[in-house]
Image: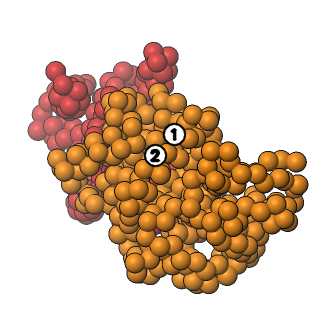
Chain colours: A red, B orange
Amino acid sequence: MSKTTLVVALLAVAVAAAIFIGPAALSADVLQIRLNRVILGIFAGGILGFCGAILQGLFNNPLVEPYTLGSASGAALGAALGIVTIGFLNPLFAFAGSLGVGLLVFVIARSHAGALQDRLILAGVIMSFLCSSLVMIIMVMSGRELYEILYLLMGYLGVIMNPGQRVIAIAILVLSLAIVIYLYRHHRELDILSQGAETASGLGVDTHRLSRNLFFATALLTGFVVSLVGAIGFVGLVIPHIAKRLFGPKHLRNLPASFILGAAFLLLADTLSRTITVYELPVGVVTSLIGVPFFIYLYSKR
Amino acid sequence: MNAIEVKNLNFSYDGKPVIRDISFTLKEGEFAGVIGPNGAGKSTLLRLLSRILDIQQGEIIVQGQKIRELDRRSLARAIGFVPQETHFTLDFTVADIVLMGRYPYLRPFQAESVGDREIMEQALAEAEVAEFKNRPVNSLSSGERQRVVIARALCQQPKILLLDEPTSHLDLRHQTGIMNLLKKLNGQGISIVIVNHDLNLAALYCRRLILLDRGTIRSDGTPTELIDEKLLKEVYQSEVRVIRHPDHDLPQVLLK
């Protein structure tokens, strides 16, 4: 069986498990709820894996993911603010947070000389810390919203939406797909960037413009993900490594692989999170719990 | 036609001038070496010529077109750039790396054509790395890797090659190997500008030398005109002796 078939089969298994496994018997209502989770899981897992692969390629650094660059923390901060001020997870607050912090990171990074890429990482890490502190303050001062913020910070696919929110969610999915295709167009530039910015410039890549565009596009996508399902960690960091090990360094292949593997991984983690205990664990906890040992195994095998 | 014209070029990093009012013309088919002490502005000049750095003041004209008005991909079809050292952080094969030289000719998602692959094979053969084609580039020695980078630049089918100290990390055999390769390419009509710290190597291979000192052109001429004890002593602030090479009628520099 080819690797591509294997990966697609894995996603199919994950989707089937997400639909058929669970404490309740499969009725029309339950099916509806689980299909919602499947769609959100594919969207969030796919995008986080994909963005991680884009960013690791862009920054030529295997440790970069949406969380390193501040946009996820910014989205979480925005969403937390939304929860305490208007009472529910509002996508607009999360976008505002991710784009606002992304912009701030970019401005800080650009105000210094030197390689834009290195500066972006540094500014992103610093802003992530600031956002985390601000979220903590919000949590300390919040009352009964604390529980909701906690789930926001760890991620949760079981969001129940009213019709208005559903329309927003569908718009987000469509827009995200367009941005993903836009990002995928740059697969060859990312291959070239692995040899350094100077080489890339010499081959005709406008590295500054590319860094800026890819940075903001991934920040926007991260904001979308956090606004719908909260801040799910680990997927964006680890999935691209697995995709690269399976499909090699060419981004033409490892970018879609990161998307599919991320989607499958998050769905499996979500199915586990709602079946292993009587409580439903936040999915972000499960992604780390099964992801870390797997990652260690993968790297010790090398 | 002129390959490159540089007119009144100025450039500064954070307000510190590095290139001061440099003007020169590189004719088609020339083999020019840029020499000078550390910090003279050699690498900066090369980065400006290949538009890795954007010019601040003055003009660079590449094959009759202003560099600022050329889009980057067109420029990459005219000029190939070889950096001092390349780190390959991902596990690409030699063929993958060389094929990336086709980037300025390809649109997103457009697969490399049979023609592109033929150009790649030619570049591999030209740079004498065809035998490594399917090997991971990181399994090669630094001399072999430098040839792969030159092959990648050749895959751009450039009229001009710019090289920033391409031999500085290499042993004697690979140094002469790279320089002989450049000589051969120059014989095929590619204009070459090479930044080189090794004055003797430069004197042996370059037919024209441009001596930079603190951001300006101190002297510009043939090796015989330029390699001069008094001039070098002044610019490099060290005592040297200049002798003739016993086999070639060219100057060589000895430390005193």
Label 2: which secondary element: helix
Q: Chain of mark 2?
A: B
Label 1: which secondary element: helix
* Quadrant position of residue A206: bottom left
Estimate the x, y position of residue A272 in percent, counting from the top left: 34, 25
Q: Residue furthest left?
A: A28
Residue at 44% across, 65% down: B29
The residue tagged 1 is B177
Q: Chain of mark 1?
A: B
Residue at 53% across, 77% down: B25
Residue at 73% across, 73% down: B218
- Disc assigned to residue B181: 2
Q: In the image, are marks 1 and 2 on the same chain?
A: yes
Q: Amino acid at mark 2?
A: Leu
Q: Is residue A107 left or right of residue B81?
A: right
Q: Is residue A301 above or below residue A72?
A: above
Q: Amino acid at mark 1?
A: Gly
Contact, CB < 8 Å: mark 1 with mark 2? yes
Q: Quadrant of the N terminus of chain A?
A: top left
Q: Residue furthest top?
A: A301
Residue A294 visible in the picture:
yes
